[in-house]
Amino acid sequence: MSSYRSSPREFPAVSHLALHIIQTLCKINFMKPKNPKTPPADPPPRKKRGALMVYEKLRDDIQWMRIAPGSALDEVALAQAYEVSRTPIREALLLLVNEGFVQFLQNRTTIVAPLSMHNQNAFLDTFILLSRGLIRATTMHGPVDRDALAPYLDDYSEGLAENDVERAFRAQLGLFRHLTELAKNRFLAKYFLEAQDASVRMKLLYFFPHLSADDIATARIKLEAVIDAVAAGDPEAGDRAVSDVILFETQVIQRGIEPRFGHQMTLESPGTGGTS
């Protein structure tokens, strides 16, 4: 039985050009991998919208003093600024009222909560106790890799040296926020972070602006002592170190609000001596 070979002449309806295209497509198909493993594309990050978006942005602006304490908040203007209706604005303001960042007045005016020194001693007592508890809870889990904590100290130091207050402060806040994760106590983390957030405006106004060159060096040393204690898993050293940090900050704040020169000025009229 003779073998049969097809040729273009046996298919007169198929042109040479069509055969060339078919052969090319076959080669391309043969060269493709049988089981291509293309990693699935990551879905685009979902943008926060509505009340949650307004809440986070407005809270950040209030906390970092981009909106001054006591400033009026107009719902219509906020709705235009954030390109939302007034309903998400109202919901965000209610959340901020609950956290103490916003106040509703009796005349239906909404304002940023004024920064008051009222009950600051009680707040600082609470903040110190929560901070000590946080450090003890963290160190009780054992030593921590210091390399994971060092970048916070570097950012803090460089921010202070460059007078970049927000960078330095965010580094300090980030360090303690990281420690709340290491402490593995969600109740302690909740109340510590709430107290820490309540301290931001006070420190922006009364701590960082009054740091001298010596204070900057001291602030770095004291924060480094906290990191060293946590890295070593030493609860006693951590207790002392974090207490020293807050007491040092309190001293700077007190120095910043005390009179500078008024008590040293002479207000008496100079004597007018003369002869008769």
Image (cartoon, grey):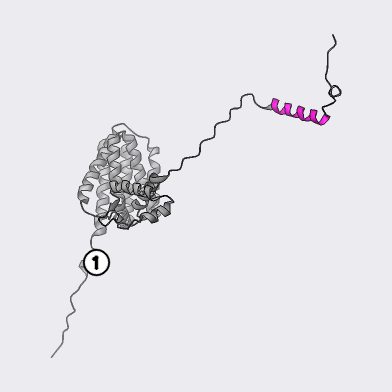
**Res. 156 visible in picture:** no
Displayed quadrant of residue 115:
bottom left
Number of other residues with Cα within 10 Å of mark 1, as a class: few under 14, some 14 to 19, many 20 or more: few
Q: In which quarter of the image is the C terminus?
A: bottom left
Is 46 on the left or on the right of 199, as rendered? right
Q: Which of 217 and 155 is in front in this view?
A: 155
Give x and y (percent) for residue 261.
24, 66
34 inside magenta stretch: no
Q: Is the magenta stretch mostly helix, strand or loop?
A: helix
Which secondary structure, mark 1?
loop
Q: In which quarter of the image is the N terminus?
A: top right
Task: State how many labels appear.
Answer: 1
Give x and y (percent) for residue 4.
83, 15
Q: Which of 265 and 83 is in front in this view?
A: 83
First to last magenta residue range:
14-30
**Res. 76 visible in picture:** yes
Is 175 on the left or on the right of 17, as rendered? left
In the picture shown, does residue 222 fall above or below 232?
A: below
Looking at the image, the residue that sits furthest to the left is 276
Identified at 22% across, 51% down, the residue is 120
Q: Which of 132 and 105 is in front in this view?
A: 105
Looking at the image, the residue that sits furthest to the top is 1
Is 108 on the left or on the right of 150, as rendered? left
Question: Where does label 1 land, which residue?
Answer: 261
> Which amino acid, by three-letter code, is at mark 1?
Phe
Identified at 76% across, 28% down, the residue is 22
